[in-house]
Amino acid sequence: MSQYKSMLVFTDEVSYQSAMAKARDKVNIFNNALGVASNHIAVVDTKKFAEGFTAYFKKEFYKKHKNKIQLDISVDKLLGLLDVNLSPLHDLETKFNSNESEIKWEGNKAIPYVNRKLYERWSRSAEENEKVKAGRRFISAIEELQKYSKCYPLDIARGTSGLITFNLREKKYMVNLN
């Protein structure tokens, strides 16, 4: 038997793209929150801002405006006196925290991130490698045969005891090792 080297069997592209869309949504929510906060303060450290929108906003807002009022008052009173509504920022923070997607940072810019490896299926043994190779050769033969005759995916899946399946969403055959 030859040296075993893991092979990529398939990638669940649909689930991966769905996860990327959720991650992009999270970045969009973050950027909207930055826009709301930037109306009143300058957001210098976006990573700290991402940890807690309203807490960061209150801290920076107080630093910026504490000299305008000579009294020692709380940040909430100061927000009330200057008629600043934090509810849009709080709503965005709630949406941001409820989205469990991961984001990465390039400097101070948020980038959507999804680990592609979580959506890949790799072979786990030399025997599985042989099944994948044989299955791919069979799929090539089916695709060649389809030029001349109709092939029925359900019958092919049954005929191979489920080793070859048909992905209806992508309309293509694939090797199934489950």
Image (cartoon, grey):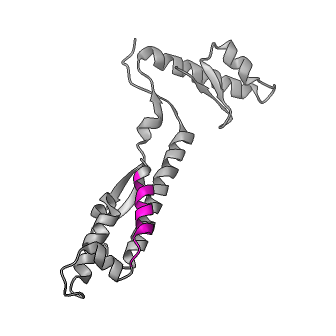
Could you say where residue 4 lies in the image, as x and y percent from the top left?
A: 38, 19
Write down the quadrant of residue 67 in the picture: bottom left
Work out whether residue 86 or residue 140 is closer to the camera in this orientation and state it.
86
Question: In screen coordinates, is 67 left or right of 110?
Answer: left
Whether 133 is drawn above or below 42: the answer is: above
Residue 41 in view in this figure: no
Question: Which residue ends up furthest to the right in the rendered image?
Answer: 149
Q: Which residue is drawn at 33% across and 77% down?
A: 79
Q: Out of 115 and 73, give the one closest to the viewer.
A: 73
**Front in this rendered view, residue 96 or 89:** 89
Residue 84 image-quadrant placement: bottom left
Q: Can residue 91 be seen in this view?
A: yes
Q: Position of residue 103 (x, y in %)?
A: 38, 53
Q: Give the range drawn in magenta.
A: 84-97
Q: Quadrant of the N terminus?
A: top left
The chief SS type of the magenta part is helix
Residue sitting at x 77%, y 24%: 151
Residue 59's spot in the image, x, y percent? 25, 71
Left or right of 177? Residue 148 is: right
Q: Is residue 94 magenta?
A: yes
Count all numbered tags in the image, as a single digit: 0
Q: Residue at x 43, y 36 (%)?
A: 118
Answer whether residue 141 is magenta in the image: no
Q: Position of residue 49 (x, y in %)?
A: 31, 64
The residue lying at 47 percent from left, 62 percent from top is: 28
Q: Decide: is 69 above or below 42.
A: below
